[in-house]
Each structure stands twice: as structure tokens, then as C-alpha cells.
């Protein structure tokens, strides 16, 4: 497995950052390759400006800011998203990464019939590792925005055999050290096994 880890949390001492280390260790223990993209550490700019919007549907050769990200997406056969859920969805920087990078020529292209097809059909595994301050039931009522955005919408751009795994820790604000330890172990085990149960 060649895994691209995409991390979105501003605090390098956060539990989310700890989960990234856990994911890296799980991949390493199973002999998988990985590259980590820490959006806050790289100071990725989330907001799309008017120039970028004008070029959004153009081919990737006129959007040089997408090049290093496109190379990562082409290299990987798996994507592991690690982020906290804020206000029912992923942090703005993560959504901004999708808005600014997952553009025509990088993540998709339009066919003559107007359908969306893409160069990411080699992606075979997607993992979403996230934490929620509220309970599972509250998030279920709110619609699990991140799960739908990544696990359904973006999933349509990947290979038809692509498998997705949702690994969420709920009630993180009231969790115990033991609960966090058990979730960490589950994440490490799942990643090391490549998503198999």
C-alpha cells in the first residue's frame, strides 16, 4: 500500500496529531509506504481566489499550485484522512484543499457526454480517521458531513473496487485516557491490516 496521509489540525500536540503518528506506525509495521501532508504545517491557504475560480475548469497545466498535490495523489493508491470534526464537518483547511486542488485535470475531467471521470481510479482504499466532540447520535442527526463528503462524493472519483473505512471517536471532549488508548489501538490495527476487519 502507498498511503497518502492528509492531516488537518493546527495543534501539533493534539490527539489528532497523535493519531497521525499512530497511522504512520501502523503503516510502517506492515511494510507499507506513506507520505504525510500536514495542511496546517505547510500553511496551506484554504480560500480560493477569483483567479483560481476562473481557472477551476481549465486543464491542470495552467494551475501550477496543484502540481505537488497532484503528484502525491498520483503516487498514492490509498488516502488516509485524519482530522477533527468541527461544526459537523471537516476543518475549513481540509475542505479548502479539496476545493483548490481537486480540480479539473487533477481529480476529474468531463467526458464528451458531460460525465465526470478521473485520473484517480487507481485509489483502492480510503480511510477516514476523525474525532467528534459530541455523541454518535448527535452526529447521526447532523448528517455526518465528512463521512458523506469523502466516503460518498469523493469516493465516486476512485476505482470501482475502492473500499472505505470510517474510524470515528465520539464524545472526545468527555473521553477517558483508556477510551482514547483503545481507539488509538483500533486505528493502528485497522491501518496495519489495510482496512480488513
Image (cartoon, rainbow, N blue to C red):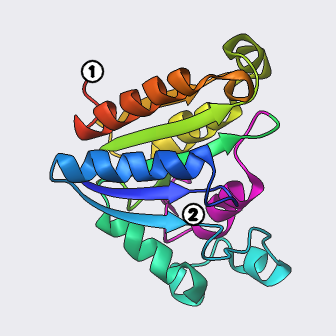
How far is disc 1 from disc 2 in space, using C-alphas?
30 Å
In the figure, is residue 88 to the left or right of 97?
right
Q: Give the quarter of the image for residue 146.
A: top right
The quarter of the rendered structure image containing the C terminus is: top left
Residue stretch rendered in magenta on the structure: 88-114
Q: Give the quarter of the image for residue 2.
A: bottom left
Residue 163 image point, x, y percent:
34, 33
Which residue is disc 1 drawn over? 197
In the figure, is residue 32 to the left or right of 112?
left
Residue 168 numbered tag? none
Q: Is residue 104 magenta?
A: yes
Mark 2: few, some, or many residues within 10 Å (few <14, many ≥20)?
A: some
Q: Is residue 129 magenta?
A: no
**Nearest the camera: 74 or 7?**
7
> Extreme top residue here?
137
Q: Is residue 69 above or below residue 8?
A: below
**Nearest the camera: 179 or 114?**
179
Foreground disc of the pair 1, 2: 1
Q: Is residue 104 above or below residue 137?
A: below
Which residue is disc 2 drawn over? 102
Sequence order check, earlier mark of 1 and 2:
2
In the figure, is residue 63 to the left or right of 196?
right
Query: Is disc 1 in contact with disc 2, using a CB cutoff of under 8 Å?
Result: no
Amino acid at each position: 500500500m502507498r498511503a497518502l496521509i492528509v492531516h488537518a489540525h493546527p495543534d501539533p500536540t493534539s490527539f489528532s496529531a497523535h493519531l497521525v503518528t499512530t497511522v504512520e506506525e501502523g503503516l510502517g509495521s506492515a511494510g507499507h509506504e506513506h507520505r504525510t501532508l500536514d495542511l496546517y504545517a505547510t500553511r496551506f491557504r484554504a480560500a480560493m481566489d477569483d483567479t483560481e475560480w476562473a481557472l477551476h475548469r481549465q486543464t491542470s497545466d495552467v494551475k501550477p499550485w496543484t502540481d505537488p498535490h497532484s503528484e502525491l495523489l498520483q503516487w498514492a493508491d490509498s488516502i488516509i484522512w485524519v482530522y477533527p470534526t468541527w461544526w459537523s464537518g471537516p476543518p475549513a483547511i481540509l475542505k479548502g484543499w479539496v476545493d483548490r486542488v481537486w480540480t479539473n485535470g487533477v481529480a476529474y475531467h468531463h467526458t464528451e457526454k458531460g460525465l465526470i471521470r478521473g485520473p484517480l481510479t487507481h485509489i483502492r482504499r480510503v480511510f477516514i480517521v476523525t474525532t467528534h466532540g459530541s455523541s454518535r447520535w448527535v452526529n447521526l442527526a447532523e448528517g455526518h458531513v465528512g463521512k458523506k463528503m469523502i466516503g460518498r462524493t469523493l469516493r465516486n472519483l476512485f476505482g470501482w473496487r475502492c473500499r472505505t473505512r470510517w474510524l470515528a471517536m465520539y464524545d472526545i471532549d468527555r473521553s477517558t485516557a483508556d477510551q482514547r488508548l483503545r481507539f488509538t489501538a483500533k486505528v493502528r490495527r485497522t491501518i496495519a491490516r489495510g482496512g480488513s476487519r
